[in-house]
Amino acid sequence: MIQQYNQILVPVDGSYEAELAFKKGVAVALRNHASLHLLHVVDTRAFQNISSFDTSMVEQVTDTAKQTLDKYIDEAKKAGLTDVDYSIEYGAPKTVIARDIPRNLNIDLIMIGATGLNAVERLLIGSVTEYVTRTAVCDVLVVRTDLDNKPAKNPSKRVG
C-alpha cells in the first residue's frame, strides 16, 4: 500500500527555508489530494522582555503574517490546490507546531524548512525544526532542497 497523506502542515515564518517547505508542501498536497494547512506562530515570549508592552506590536506582526499567508494561499490556488488554509497562533512555536496544531487538525505530515541556525545558535536557543523532528505526534519531512531536489541556495547566505 502506498502511503497517502491527507492533512499536511507547513509552518512558515518568512524565511527562505520556510518558502521551500511551502513550495514542496503544495506539490505533495497536489500529489496526495491532501489538505494543506499553513501555520505562522507568533512567539509571544519575544514580547515578554519589552517593558512598555503594547498590543499594537503583536497586531503589526500579525498583519505582516496575514499578508504573507494570503500570498501563499494565492500561489497554492494558482498551482491547482483547492483545499488550502492558514492559521496564526500565539505561543511557543516548538510546541504549537509539534503537538498542538497536529492534534487539533489531525495532521499526518509536517513539512518544515531546515533550520537557518548555525551550531552555536542551535546550542544556545535550540532549533524549532530539531525539536519538531524529535517530538512531533506525526511524520515530519525536513525540506533541505528546492523543487528540483538541488541543495537550497539561500540568497541571504551567499558569500561575495
Image: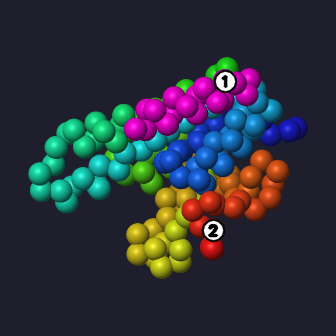
Residue 160 located left or right of residue 92 = right
Front-most of residues 14 and 49: 14
Q: Residue furthest left?
A: 52
Percent position (x, y) of residue 125?
Answer: 41, 69
Q: How is the image coloured?
A: rainbow
Magenta span: helix, strand or loop, mainly?
helix
Q: Let me know if residue 79 is in the magenta part.
A: yes
Q: Which residue is mark 2?
A: 158
Report the residue at 53% width, 52% height from top.
Answer: 15
Q: Where residue 145 is drawn, which disc sits there?
A: none
Label 2 residue SS: loop
User: Which amino acid type corresponds to the residue marked 2 in the rendered image?
Assistant: Arg
Q: Which residue is mark 1?
A: 77
Task: Choose top left, top right, bottom left or bottom right for residue 158.
Answer: bottom right
Residue 41 located left or right of residue 60 = right
For the C terminus, which image quadrant?
Answer: bottom right
Residue 138 in sight in this render: no
Q: Residue furthest right?
A: 1
Report the residue at 11% width, 51% height from top.
Answer: 52
Front-most of residues 71 and 103: 71
Percent position (x, y) of residue 1?
Answer: 88, 38
Q: In this picture, is 89 found above or below 120?
A: above
Q: Let me know if residue 42 is in the magenta part.
A: no
Q: In terms of sequence position, does the residue under pointer 2 or pointer 1 come before the other?
A: 1
Q: In this picture, is 158 found above or below 44?
A: below
Residue 118 in sight in this render: yes
Report the residue at 35% width, 37% height from top.
Answer: 62
Q: Which contiguous range is marked in magenta?
A: 64-80
Label 1 residue SS: helix
Percent position (x, y) of residue 116?
Answer: 55, 64
